[in-house]
Amino acid sequence: MDAFGVYTEKGFPMIEELRSDALDLLDELKHDLGKYIYLPVGFLPKDASSEAFTSAVHTAIFRTRRAQGTVESAHDIWERFCQEAGNLILHSTSYPRLVQAVDVALSWGNRLSEPLDMVHRECVIRDFQNVGRAIARVQDEIDE
């Protein structure tokens, strides 16, 4: 059985197409969420104020992707991926870690009522980077 929970035997000509579709969706997710959730905080100078860092976290979560006059939040990007991916990756053993990484990263949006300090900064950066890493693990598993 492969990562899709489908038996990979002759008679299943769609398997490779499904694998390709899943990898395409994961590539898009890695770009739109894995990259863009990290960029606002990743490019801040190390000595940025707590207010500047908190603002960058807000941008990362609530204004994650801006293109062609539209703005998407990290939650919107994740929901779109889940709808488009459907059952394509649910059987991946790495998928639960991806869900957890996204949940942890998005949870920082609930903590922005006060400026985030240096301790939070390290955790946020790690949590945002973990989203991209978790996407890459699912990609690697499906691409085997």
Image (cartoon, grey):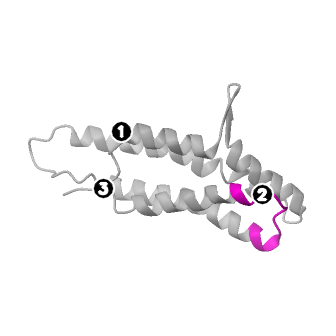
* Quarter containing the C terminus: bottom left
Residue 44 appears anywhere in the view: no
10 Å crowding of disc 3: few (<14), some (14-19), many (20+): some
Name which of mark 3 and mark 2 comes first in the sequence: 3
> Along the horizontal axis of the image, is 8 left or right of 143?
left
Name the image quarter holding residue 117.
Answer: bottom right
Q: What residue type is disc 2 on?
A: Leu
Q: Distance between the residues labelled 2 and 1?
A: 36 Å
Q: Position of residue 50 (x, y in %)?
A: 87, 63
Q: Which stretch is magenta? A: 109-121
Residue name at image x 73 percent, y 70 percent = 122
Q: Residue 91 carries which label?
A: 3
10 Å crowding of disc 2: few (<14), some (14-19), many (20+): some
Marks 1 and 3: in contact by CB < 8 Å?
A: no
What is the total number of numbered labels drawn onto the structure image? 3
Q: Could you say whether the residue bearing mark 2 is in a helix, strand or loop?
A: loop
Q: Distance between the residues labelled 3 and 1?
A: 15 Å
Task: Judge depth for marks 3 and 2 and give the one in front.
Answer: 2
10 Å crowding of disc 1: few (<14), some (14-19), many (20+): some
Task: Judge depth for marks 2 and 1 and give the one in front.
Answer: 2
- Magenta highlight on residue 13: no
Q: Residue 112 carries which label?
A: 2
Q: What residue type is disc 1 on?
A: Asp
Q: Could you say whether the residue bearing mark 3 is in a helix, strand or loop?
A: loop
Name the image quarter holding residue 75.
Answer: top right
Q: What residue type is disc 3 on?
A: His
Residue bearing the label numbered 1 = 21
Q: Position of residue 89 (x, y in %)?
A: 35, 50
Residue name at image x 22 percent, y 43 percent = 15
Task: Judge depth for marks 3 and 1 and give the one in front.
Answer: 3
